[in-house]
Image (cartoon, grey):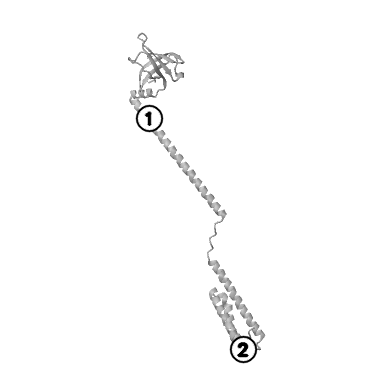
Amino acid sequence: MIGMTEIPNQALTPALTSARLTSTIHAMDTMKLLLGATVALLLGAFAMSWKGMNRGVNNDSPDAIDRLKKQVAELRQEQDNLEIQRKLQQLKNTPAPTPAPTPASNAAELEALKAQLEALKAADTKIAAEKDKNKRDAKVAQDEEGLLSQRDLDKGDAELRRARMIGEALLIGRVKEYVEDAQFGGFITFEIIMPDQVHEGTVLGIRRKTGILGQFKVSEVTAAGGVANPLPGFGPFQPKVGDELILPPQY
């Protein structure tokens, strides 16, 4: 242990007074003052110890040494407290680090992205359906407009309407053979395509393109085909093999 002599109270009073004023001074300034006081106290103790050693004084009061040790310990404790407060203040001023994403947050983000993707797919499907509907509506409107225009033309031109009806008439049969007969005016044999429309007495017209060349009345229906005789009212003409037979439309 280093021998020390009692330091006069007048030398210690400024340092202790400075230590007691720490609560009213800024933390950094307080620490500087405390450190200065500690250094001053230690230097004073060292000087007194050195002076005592030079004079050969070995009878220092134990109470004075104990008081000096206690004062030094209090100063160091105060210094440690201020250091702790400084570190706490630094921690408060330091921005908190951004937490790393956890597996749970990653899963939630993935689910949110999936939901957005499904919503985009649904919206795309809806848009495609609306486009198809618009196309169908446009086509229907165009067809209706064309039909109305055709009807207007038909009203203005009876021959055009008649030709259209002949062209749209169902195909009932086709001529297989024409047999001339000077006495009975000849007859035709024909292939029956729609049996439910052909009976004895049915009147069929021979269609070429959009016109009717003549009419024949069915006189016989067999499994091999039908036989029909010409009706008066048409000019002379000769049916050909393959001529189409239809039910004459009602104009």
Dot 2 crowding, Cα within 10 Å, few <14, some 14–19, many 20+:
some
Q: Are marks 2 and 1 in contact (CB under 8 Å)?
A: no
| Quadrant (top left/top right/bottom left/bottom right) for the N terminus | bottom right
Q: Which amino acid does the dot numbered 1 rest on?
A: Leu
Image quarter of residue 47: bottom right
* Residue 108 in view, yes or no: yes
Residue toward you, 225 or 30: 225
| Residue under the point 46% across and 18% down | 195
Q: From the image, tell me which residue sits under label 1.
A: 148
> Is residue 26 visible to us here?
no
Label 2, label 1: how many angstroms apart (C-alpha)? Answer: 133 Å
Q: Quadrant of residue 162?
A: top left
| Residue 68 falls left or right of residue 231 | right
Q: Which residue is mark 2?
A: 53
What x and y, as percent, mark residue 121?
A: 49, 44
Disc 2 marks a residue whose amino acid type is Met
Name the residue located 45 percent from the left edge and 14 percent from the top edge: 221
Q: Secondary structure at mark 2?
A: helix
Q: Give the mark nearer the N terminus: 2 vs 1.
A: 2
Please state, as top left, top right, bottom left or bottom right, where the C terminus lies in the image.
top left
Residue 132's spot in the image, x, y percent?
44, 38
In the image, farthest residue toward the bottom: 55
The answer to whether 109 is drawn above or below residue 123 in the figure is below
Q: Position of residue 104 (x, y in %)?
A: 57, 54
What residue appears at the point 62 percent right and 89 percent down from the top-left corner? 53
Q: SS at mark 1?
A: helix
Q: Residues within 10 Å of mark 1 (few under 14, many from 20)?
A: few
- Note whether 241 is above or below 14 in the view shown: above
